Image (tube, helix red, strand yellow):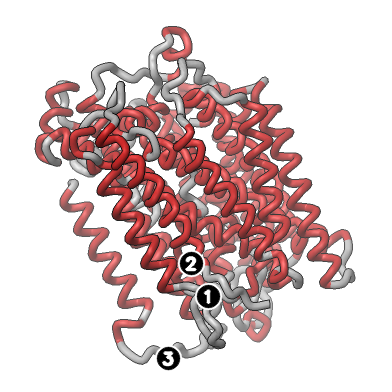
C-alpha cells in the first residue's frame, strides 16, 4: 500500500496546530497579562513564534497535501 | 548521567495549564494516528523491519540524527555544558561529524549493496555466525535495557519538572510507543522521529534566541561567564586541551581526537544498529550515502539548542546549580535541570507545553528507536538465524510485532528495576559502550581488509569487549587505576571513557590482525559486495556535480573545520 499522506504533511499539520494554539495564547496575553510572566515577556515571543510556526505549518500542509496524482516521490 | 537524573528529588519546577496540556495531547493523538495509518503498509518483513527501503535521503537523514537526539541526550549535555563549559560541544562536532561523513562516503555502499538487514547481519556475511551471534545478543540485551532506562529517565524528568506520577509517565509513554511501533514498524518509528526532530527545534530554539538577547550577544556571554566563574577556560573548545589539568573536564586533546573523535564516535555512528538501521531504509544507494551527510549538517547545528542554553545558564541564573548528590541533600537544583530551568525562565503557557512536548517526544522517540532496532535484531539475527530458520515471511512479521510488545514490557520492567538500584543504570550505559568500540574495529577491518578471517572477526570482537570490561572493572575496583588507563594522574571520568574505548579498539584490531594471519582467508570471490577492493560499487548517476554526496560531505567538512577554529 502506498501512503497518500506524506510525512511532511503530518509535520505541517502538527506545526500548524501548534502555531495556532501558541499564537492565540500570545494574542490573548496582550489583553490578559500573566501574573508571573517569564523573562523577556515584553518581546511577546508567543506571538511571533506562533506566527512563524503557523506559516511554516501552512506551507507544509498545503505543499504536501494528499493528491490524486500517481508516481509522487514525496513521502 | 542517568543516575544523576534518577536521584533528582528537587521540588517541582513548573505547573502546566490547560493550553500546555492541549499541546501535549495533540502530539499523542498524531503519534497514535500515524501508527494506525501505517499499519497497512507494514505487512512484509521488508516493510516492517526496513520500512520497505523506500525512504528518501532527507527522511532517512533526519531520522538518522533524530534517533540519537533523545531528551536524555539533550538534557544531559546541557547539564554537562553547565558543568564543564563548551568542551561538551566536542560530543556534537568531532565526536560525530567525521564519523557520519565517513559512514556516508566510505561504509554505506558496503552496508547497502550487501542488502543486509542489520549490522549483525553484515557480520554474518563477512565473518560467519560466531561474530553475528556475539554482536546480536549483546546488542539486543543492551538495547532493551537502554530503552527501559530512557523510559525511567523520562518519568523522573516529568516528576521533577511537572510533579507527574512515575507510573503514569512510564505506562502512558510505553503503551503509546508499543502501539505505534508494533503497528507501523520501522516506518512508523521513522515518521515519528521526523516529527520529534521538528518538535525539538520548535520547542527548544526559543531558549538560546531569548537567552542571547538577554545577555547581549555572544561576546557579552563569554565575558559574563568569565566574570561569574573567575576563569576563562569554559568558553574555549581546543586551546585548553593541552593537558588534563588545564580544563574543567580533565581530558586532553589526544583523548578527544582519537578516543572520542575516532573510536567512540566512529563506533557509535557507523556500527550501532539503532542509527544505522535508519540509513539502511533508504530508497537507493545515493540516498543511503546522502542521508548521513544530511544528518551531519543538522547534527552540527544541535549545540545551538543544547550547549548554548547551558552556557547562558552560567551567565543568567541567579543561583548556582550543583552536582546531583549535593542537590539531593540540600534541595538545590542540579546540573541536569538546566534545560527545564531555562525553558521555565523564558516560556509562558503554550510555549512551555511545546518545550515539555519536545522532551517527551525525544524520550519516546529514543525508546521507539531502541525497540524497533531490538525487534529487528531479535527476529533476523537471533530468532530467524538460530531458533527458527525456515518460517514464513508472515511469521517473521508477527514475531517482529510480538517482540516489539515484549521488548516494551521488558523495558517497563527495567524501568521499575532501576528505581531500586540507581547505580545499575550507569553500569548499563557503560556496558553498552563496551560493545561499540570493539565492534567498530571488527566492522571496519571487515570492510577494508580482505585478509580478515572468520575466526579473527569473532576473537577480535571478544578480546576487545573483554578488554573494555576488564579496564572498567579495574577502575571500579581501584580508582587510582585511572592514571594508567588514561595515561595521566590528572585524568577524570570523561577521560576514562574515551581512553577505555581506545584501548578496546586497539586490542580488537591487534587480535583480529594476528588471528587473521594465523588462519585461512576466504577466497576473494566470496567477499564480493562486502569488502573494499573485492567489490564493484554500482555507479551513481548525478545530473550535476553539486548533486554528488562527496561534494556535500566536503561542504559539511569545511563548515565543521571553520566552526572549530571560530570557537578554538
Marks 1 and 3 close (CB-CB < 8 Å):
no
Q: Secondary structure at mark 2?
A: helix
**Residue B423 placed where, x, y %?**
59, 24
Q: How many marks?
A: 3
Instruction: Tell me the residue that label 2 is attached to.
Output: A9
Q: What is the crowding at mark 2: few (fewer than 14 residues within 10 Å), some, or many (at least 20)?
A: many
Residue B51 placement: quadrant: bottom right
- Chain name for mark 1: A
Residue drawn at the location 25% of the way across and 48% of the way down: A48
Marks 1 and 2 close (CB-CB < 8 Å):
yes
Question: How far is mark 2 from mark 3, CA to CA?
Answer: 29 Å
Q: Nearer the viewer, mark 2 or mark 3?
A: 2
Question: How far is mark 1 from mark 2, CA to CA?
Answer: 8 Å
**Residue B471 placed where, x, y %?**
55, 35
Residue drawn at the location 36% of the way across and 81% of the way down: B548
Instruction: Tell me the residue that label 1 is attached to.
Output: A66
Q: What is the crowding at mark 3: few (fewer than 14 residues within 10 Å), some, or many (at least 20)?
A: few
Q: What is the crowding at mark 1: few (fewer than 14 residues within 10 Å), some, or many (at least 20)?
A: few
Q: Nearer the viewer, mark 1 or mark 3?
A: 1
- Determine whether B204 is above or below B154 in the image: below
Q: Nearer the viewer, residue B176 or B440?
A: B176
Residue drawn at the location 55% of the way across and 78% of the way down: B283
Instruction: Tell me the residue that label 3 is attached to.
Output: B541
Amino acid at each position: 500500500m502506498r501512503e497518500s499522506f506524506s510525512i511532511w504533511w503530518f509535520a505541517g499539520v502538527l506545526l500548524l496546530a501548534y502555531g495556532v494554539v501558541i499564537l492565540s495564547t500570545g494574542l490573548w496575553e496582550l489583553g490578559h497579562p500573566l501574573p508571573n510572566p517569564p523573562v523577556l515577556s515584553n518581546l511577546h515571543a508567543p506571538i511571533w513564534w506562533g506566527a512563524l510556526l503557523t506559516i511554516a505549518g501552512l506551507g507544509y500542509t498545503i505543499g504536501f497535501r494528499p493528491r490524486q496524482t500517481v508516481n509522487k516521490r514525496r513521502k | 548521567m542517568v543516575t544523576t537524573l534518577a536521584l533528582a528529588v528537587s521540588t517541582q519546577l513548573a505547573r502546566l495549564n490547560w493550553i500546555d496540556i492541549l499541546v501535549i495531547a495533540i502530539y499523542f493523538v498524531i503519534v497514535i494516528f500515524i501508527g494506525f495509518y501505517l499499519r497497512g503498509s507494514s505487512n512484509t518483513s521488508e516493510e516492517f523491519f526496513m520500512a520497505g527501503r523506500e525512504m528518501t535521503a532527507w527522511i532517512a537523514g533526519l531520522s538518522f540524527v533524530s534517533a540519537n537526539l533523545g531528551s536524555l541526550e539533550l538534557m544531559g549535555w546541557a547539564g554537562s555544558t553547565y558543568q564543564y563549559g563548551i568542551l561538551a560541544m566536542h560530543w556534537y562536532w568531532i565526536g560525530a561529524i567525521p564519523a557520519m561523513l565517513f559512514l556516508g562516503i566510505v561504509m554505506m555502499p558496503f552496508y547497502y549493496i550487501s542488502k543486509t538487514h542489520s549490522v549483525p547481519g553484515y557480520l554474518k556475511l563477512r565473518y560467519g555466525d560466531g561474530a553475528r551471534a556475539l554482536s546480536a545478543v549483546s546488542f539486543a540485551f543492551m538495547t532493551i535495557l537502554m530503552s527501559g532506562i530512557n523510559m525511567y529517565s523520562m518519568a523522573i524528568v516529568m516528576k521533577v519538572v511537572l510533579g507527574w506520577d512515575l507510573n503514569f509517565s512510564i505506562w502512558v509513554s510505553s503503551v503509546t510507543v508499543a502501539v505505534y511501533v508494533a503497528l507501523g514498524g520501522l516506518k512508523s518509528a521513522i515518521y515519528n522521529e521526523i516529527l520529534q526532530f521538528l518538535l525539538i527545534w520548535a520547542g527548544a530554539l526559543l531558549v538560546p534566541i531569548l537567552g542571547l538577547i538577554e545577555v547581549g550577544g555572544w561576546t557579552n556571554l563569554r565575558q559574563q561567564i568569565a566574570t561569574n566563574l573567575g576563569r576563562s577556560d569554559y568558553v574555549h573548545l581546543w586551546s585548553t586541551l593541552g593537558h588534563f589539568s588545564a580544563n574543567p573536564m580533565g581530558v586532553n586533546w589526544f583523548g578527544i581526537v582519537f578516543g572520542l573523535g575516532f573510536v567512540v564516535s566512529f563506533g557509535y555512528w557507523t556500527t550501532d544498529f539503532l542509527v544505522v538501521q535508519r540509513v539502511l531504509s533508504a530508497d537507493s544507494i545515493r540516498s543511503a550515502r546522502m542521508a548521513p551527510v544530511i544528518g551531519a549538517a543538522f547534527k552540527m547545528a544541535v549545540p545551538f539548542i543544547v550547549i548554548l542554553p547551558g552556557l547562558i545558564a552560567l551567565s543568567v541564573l541567579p543561583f548556582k546549580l550543583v552536582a546531583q548528590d549535593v542537590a539531593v541533600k540540600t534541595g538545590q537544583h542540579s546540573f541536569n535541570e538546566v534545560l527545564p530551568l531555562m525553558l521555565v525562565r523564558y516560556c509562558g503557557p503554550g510555549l512551555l507545553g511545546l518545550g515539555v512536548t519536545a522532551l517527551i517526544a525525544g524520550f519516546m522517540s529514543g525508546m521507539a528507536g531502541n525497540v524497533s532496532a531490538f525487534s529487528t535484531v531479535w527476529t533476523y539475527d537471533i530468532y530467524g538465524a538460530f531458533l527458527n530458520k525456515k518460517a514464513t515471511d508472515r511469521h517473521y512479521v508477527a514475531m517482529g510485532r510480538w517482540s516489539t510488545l515484549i521488548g516494551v514490557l521488558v523495558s517497563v520492567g527495567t524501568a521499575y528495576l532501576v528505581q531500586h538500584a540507581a547505580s545499575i543504570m550507569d553500569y548499563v550505559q557503560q556496558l553498552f559502550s563496551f560493545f561499540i568500540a570493539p565492534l567498530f574495529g571488527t566492522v571496519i577491518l571487515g570492510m577494508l581488509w580482505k585478509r580478515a578471517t572468520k575466526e579473527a572477526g569473532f576473537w577480535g570482537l571478544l578480546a576487545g569487549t573483554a578488554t573494555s570490561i576488564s579496564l572498567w572493572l579495574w577502575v571500579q575496583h581501584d580508582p587510582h587505576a585511572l592514571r594508567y588507563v588514561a595515561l595521566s594522574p590528572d585524568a577524570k571520568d570523561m577521560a576514562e571513557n574515551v581512553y577505555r574505548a581506545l584501548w578496546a579498539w586497539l586490542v580488537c584490531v591487534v587480535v583480529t590482525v594476528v588471528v587473521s594471519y594465523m588462519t585461512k582467508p576466504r577466497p576473494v570471490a566470496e567477499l564480493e559486495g562486502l569488502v573494499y577492493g573485492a567489490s564493484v560499487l554500482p555507479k551513481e548517476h548525478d545530473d550535476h556535480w553539486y548533486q554528488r554526496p562527496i561534494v556535500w560531505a566536503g561542504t559539511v567538512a569545511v563548515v565543521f573545520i571553520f566552526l572549530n577554529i571560530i570557537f578554538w
